[in-house]
Image (cartoon, rainbow, N blue to C red):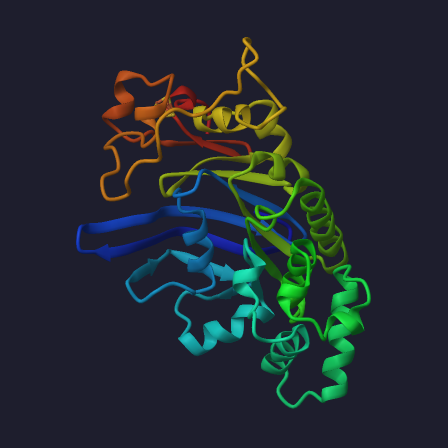
Amino acid sequence: MHDEELLRVENLRTYFNTPEGVVKAVDGVSFSIGKGETLALVGESGCGKTVTSLSLIRLLPNSAQVEADRVMIDGKESLGFSAEQARALRGKTISMIFQEPMTSLNPVYRIDKQLGEVFRLHEPGISKAEVRERSIAILKKVGVPNPAERLRSYPHELSGGLRQRVMIGISLAPNPKVLIADEPTTALDVTIQAQILELLKSLQKDMGMSILLITHDFGVVSQIAHRVAVMYAGKIVEEGKLEEIFEDPWHPYTKLLILSIPGIKVTRGGRLESIAGAVPNPLRFPEGCRFAPRCPYALDICSKEPPPETVIGDRRVSCYLKGGEAK
Ligand code: SF4
């Protein structure tokens, strides 16, 4: 529990009915984020991270069945919201930036039109002059040089880094309390990546928003997160403070993810550690621990019964190697 909690999710389940059976993309996920805090949801692709975030902002197809015991955003229960209420919530309270700005910015409209739409959506009746003034201010805030000029640009006229800055500006225009950043730097080169992460950190400091960072990259996590939740096959398998997770990962999957960061840790032979095998098909999750088929430490019981969650202080882990310790 945080001093001021802006997002609380309890037992989120997002299932898809498919002709082959039920896909349990998110299967009982719980977490919370305090004001001004960044929680990184980390895991390989196909672990359910993006579906978790899309469930929160209600941007999933009709085939998705989203249920939870509780989803509180800025103190309001949001689960039973109508589509209309969810739309109002998106942007003003919770907003999202996506991985590839070229696919989320509309290529046929100039930046002024795309930013203007956001201001008008949340404040119908706002004057043209006010829209322009606020658009320039937000572009300035996200570090776009010559903002008045840039407003006249089409997305393809901007570099990848600038497009991502504009995308962040559009997401922050309604002044959200919670920002979901889904792989916000994956499509960018390392230097621009570092600049965008710095920008997110300084905007967070200014605006006090909470960030849910979705990433597969522990290198990115180490630069921006306060806490880390590691997700595997639809479940959170470990959660703790950034330093604790890095210095002493408890779950074998977390350990292997950290070892796979280029340049951070290598095996004795100097080889980069990678995780053998693949994330299991969500139509046929293994019966016991879902990581058992890939786990180098698996015990007999691991493939028979799912491990219980063990909570120690403000850390939690689901693994038999840490089971049975004080709760
Ligand atoms: Fe490995 Fe067993 Fe722990 Fe699963 S419960 S991560 S298989 S040791």
Q: Does residue 40 appear to the left or right of 286 in the view shown? A: right
User: In the image shown, does 174 or 184 lie closer to the viewer?
Assistant: 184
Vertical relation: 112 (above or below) 164: below
Residue 244: quadrant of the picture: top right
Answer whether residue 250 is visible to the viewer in this image.
no
Residue drawn at point x = 55 percent, y = 48 percent:
183
Residue drawn at point x = 79 percent, y = 74 percent:
148
Q: Position of residue 92 (x, y in %)?
A: 60, 71
Residue 203: quadrant of the picture: bottom right
Q: Does residue 258 appear to the left or right of 292 in the view shown? A: right
User: In the image shown, does 282 or 208 lie closer to the viewer?
Assistant: 282
Residue sitting farthest toward the right: 146
Residue sitting farthest toward the top: 269
User: In the image shown, does 154 or 170 lie closer to the viewer?
Assistant: 154
Vertical relation: 225 (above or below) 83: above
Find ligand 1 in the image and state its quadrant.
top left
Q: Position of residue 302 (x, y in %)?
A: 29, 23
